[in-house]
Image: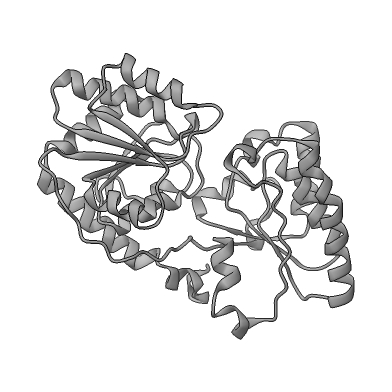
Amino acid sequence: MGEQIRTSALLPAYCEARFINLSASETLEQVGRFSVRKFLPVFHLVGEIRRTVREWKPNLVYMTPSVTMPGLLKDVLAVRAAGRSKRLLHLHNKGVEERQGRFFLNILYRMLFQDAHVILLSRLLYPDIRKYVPEKRVSYCANGIALPLTVRSRESVPRLLFLSNIIRSKGVSVLLEACRLLNERGVGFRCSLIGALSADYPGDSLSDEIREKGLEGRVVFDGPLHGKEKWDVLAKADVFVHPTMNDCFPLVILEAMGSGLPVVTTDEGAIPEMVRDGVDGLICPKGDSKVLADALERLLSDAALRTQMGESGQARYRERYTLEQFESVSSIS
């Protein structure tokens, strides 16, 4: 989303902008992991921010900070380096409320949010920062994405699709147990797992779990797919499943809705605002494989319901979550 803002053709009409890349991670495995090597460039970045603010005197400093360690520490240093400039923090993650009781993190959050204005992706996310930011300093703007035109194709056996990084917090094990239950019930389906492996869920572990649950031939891991290949698997799927246990505003759900898929997911982050339970898909409690299996079975056994929910979700995407609406000032409340 940050890249979409940086490259937006509309931005020059509103302001003159300069950009400083604050990212210290180059790969998925490095995200969220501390290393001295990652922090060495931080001192250079802090100096660059100070020089830019001092020489250019911007009216507004816009940042998209992390709220979890170790990125939080780096971003607090970056925010403080901006001095007394007016700050706008655009949060694309959450986790403040569950960590604010820790002494050191509480200090960092106070430094991060002091006098700052904040953009959140949904009103459902405000409780996460309520302790530090009065709502009068908060605006709300849902993410929006551009999607290619896709032509749906159906197969004789309904296909479930999981499309995310293969990490435990995305509910991969919950999905595999739900698939085991579906298989046990004699429900016909195929399930594709698409995404990059991570340190907490290596390939051998995933393959072993699929085999131990008797899902070989039912569940297939195809690794990460991008570009046309990704849109092709979305076009071939019948149900999109995202049983996440820790998320903020997953863009992949917008991709699925825009592709006309009913979504089975969890009551996490902004998801209940994105997906209307019983209208655009089905929302399940986090970590409950049986309820997830029940929801999937309901859609797998009812093609008309899949079509109805998929069309409803696609209309909702077009109404609220396109890139044009994200870029529109009127979308910010």
Q: How many marks?
A: 0
Q: Would you place residue 263 above or below residue 209 in this image?
A: below
Q: Position of residue 83 (x, y in %)?
A: 86, 62
168 left or right of 77? left
Work out whether residue 307 can be spotted: yes
Which quarter shows the N terminus? bottom right
299 left or right of 314? left
Q: In terms of depth relative to the viewer, which is nearer, 141 or 78?
A: 78
| Residue at x 25% of width, y 56% of height | 260
Q: Position of residue 272 (x, y in %)?
A: 39, 47
Q: In terms of depth relative to the viewer, which is nearer, 15 or 122?
A: 15
| Residue at x 54% of width, y 26% of height | 200
87 left or right of 196? right
The quarter holding residue 223 reads top left
Q: In terms of depth relative to the viewer, which is nearer, 100 or 155?
A: 155
Q: Would you place residue 184 above or below residue 228 in this image?
A: above
Q: How is the image coloured?
A: one colour
Q: Position of residue 40 (x, y in %)?
A: 83, 45
Q: Position of residue 148 (x, y in %)?
A: 33, 65
| Residue at x 23% of width, y 26% of height | 217
> Which residue sits furthest top?
212
Q: Would you place residue 16 above or below residue 167 in this image?
A: below
Work out whether residue 83 can be spotted: no
The quarter holding residue 96 reads top right
